[in-house]
Each structure stands twice: as C-alpha cells, then as structure tokens.
Image: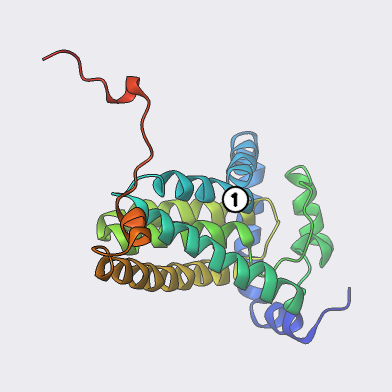
C-alpha cells in the first residue's frame, strides 16, 4: 500500500519499536486470548468516540461545584478530537497495522479480526482517554495521577492488542491527549476567573457560577429530624 511521506517516516522510524510491542501483544493473545480478547473489545467499546467522557462532562456541568471540572473535561476531549480526527488523521493517512504487513494481518485475525475504519495515526480512543483523564488531573490534583495513568494504559493496551494501531500511534495519542488536557485547563481557569470578576452585576455570570440542576426528592431526602 502506498503511503504518504509522513506515514512512511513513522513506519520506518518506529518499525522496531512497533514490531516488538505488537509481537508481545500476539504472544499474550496466544496465551490468554480467551480472557484478553473480550476484555480489550469491551475497553474499546467503552472508549468509542470519547462518549463516556462527554457524558461525564455533561453530568459534571449540571452542578455549580463540579462545573469547572466538567467544562475542562469537555474542552479537553473536544481539543483532542480536533487535533486527532480533523487535523492529523487524514494528513498523515497511516494505514492500520493489518493493512501493511502480512504478519500483522495474521495477528489481527488471531484476535478475531475486529472491524476498524479510518486511518491509524494517532489513536482517537487513546487521545480521548488521555485528554479526559489529564483534564481531571490538572483540575483535581496529583491524587488522580495513578488512576489516570491506569485508564490510559488500559486503552493503549487494548488498541495494540487488537492490532488496531501501532504502538507509536497510541504513544503519540497519549501525548496529544495530555496537551489537550493542559490547554483545556488553562482555558477553563480563564473562563471562570472572568465570570468571577463579573459575578455581582452580570446575570449570565451568576448563572454560570451558581446554577444547579434540581435533584429529585429521593436523592435529597434525609429523613425526619
């Protein structure tokens, strides 16, 4: 398959790195495929299009206390999607591993040949996971670092295990996601600082800072006193 100059450079530069890790993934599939294959398919499904992070962000934005976090997560995932899906995917146009070498195609078939469309670089699943989790880390502090790293690692593992991406694709996506989370964090801080300075005389500012979604009575009931 003919590749763009950017895709060829990636393939040549990271060929040993990619082959080594994908070979390890295939070894794991041979030894524990009965468990790992359905697990990785589930992880991929949960990370599809960053939908879970979008839903989380919308839920957080419904309450004043968590609204800045929701805005940051939403902005991070949107920023990552813009960089990955709009700017880089079609520009680099890197084929999926199973579309390049016969050995990768055999390994892809060994895990059930899961259907994939679009280009390989960078991974949209990993970008969304890294963007959403890094946004949480930037907003909530270091205590979220290890959970965030775990989520991103699982998504990277799943996408490589299923032969949907080269390891260089997921590593690049993780960096893009972290960058997106940082950008969203900076913009979120600016937005809420701006509204705080206008909170006394501006109805919109008061609404953004203070509005809460009314909770159903069964969630707020605390019994008789």
- Image spot of residue 132 (x, y percent): 46, 57
Frontmost residue, 55 versus 198 = 198
Image point (26%, 66%), residue name: 196
* In-image side of 111 versus 132 (left or right): right
Frontmost residue, 208 versus 59 = 208
Residue that label 1 marks: 158
> Toward which corner of the image does residue 30 lie, by quadrant?
top right
* In-image side of 58 versus 158 (left or right): left
> Toward which corner of the image does residue 95 lie, by quadrant?
bottom right
Secondary element under disc 1, as helix, strand or loop, is: helix
Q: Residues within 10 Å of mark 1 (few under 14, many from 20)?
A: many
In this view, 16 is above or below 125? below
Frontmost residue, 24 versus 160 = 160
Image point (40%, 47%), residue name: 60
- Image spot of residue 67 (x, y percent): 36, 53
Q: Quadrant of the N terminus?
A: bottom right
- Image spot of residue 192 (x, y percent): 32, 66
Marker count (numbered): 1
Frontmost residue, 151 versus 205 = 205
In this view, 39 is above or below 117? above
Residue extending farthest to the left is 225
Image point (58%, 43%), residue name: 46
In this view, 53 is above or below 215? below
- Image spot of residue 211 (x, y percent): 34, 47
> Toward which corner of the image does residue 103 lie, by quadrant?
bottom right
* In-image side of 72 versus 18 (left or right): left
Residue extending farthest to the top is 224
């Amino acid at each position: 398959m003919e590749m763009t100059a950017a895709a060829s450079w990636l393939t040549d530069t990271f060929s040993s790195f990619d082959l080594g890790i994908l070979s390890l993934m295939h070894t794991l599939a041979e030894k524990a495929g009965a468990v790992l294959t359905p697990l990785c398919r589930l992880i991929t499904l949960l990370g599809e299009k960053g939908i879970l992070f979008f839903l989380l962000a919308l839920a957080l934005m419904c309450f004043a206390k968590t609204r800045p976090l929701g805005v940051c997560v939403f902005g991070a995932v949107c920023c990552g999607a813009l960089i990955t899906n709009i700017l880089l995917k079609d520009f680099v146009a890197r084929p999926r591993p199973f579309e390049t070498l016969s050995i990768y195609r055999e390994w892809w078939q060994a895990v059930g040949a899961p259907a994939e469309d679009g280009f390989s670089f960078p991974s949209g699943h990993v970008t969304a996971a890294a963007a959403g989790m890094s946004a949480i880390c930037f907003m909530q502090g270091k205590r979220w670092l290890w959970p965030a790293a775990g989520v991103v690692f699982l998504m990277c593992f799943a996408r490589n295990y299923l032969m949907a991406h080269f390891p260089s694709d997921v590593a690049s996506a993780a960096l893009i996601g972290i960058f997106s989370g940082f950008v969203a964090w900076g913009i979120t801080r600016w937005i809420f600082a701006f509204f705080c300075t206008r909170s006394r005389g501006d109805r919109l500012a008061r609404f953004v800072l203070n509005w809460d979604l009314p909770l159903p009575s069964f969630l707020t009931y605390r019994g008789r006193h």
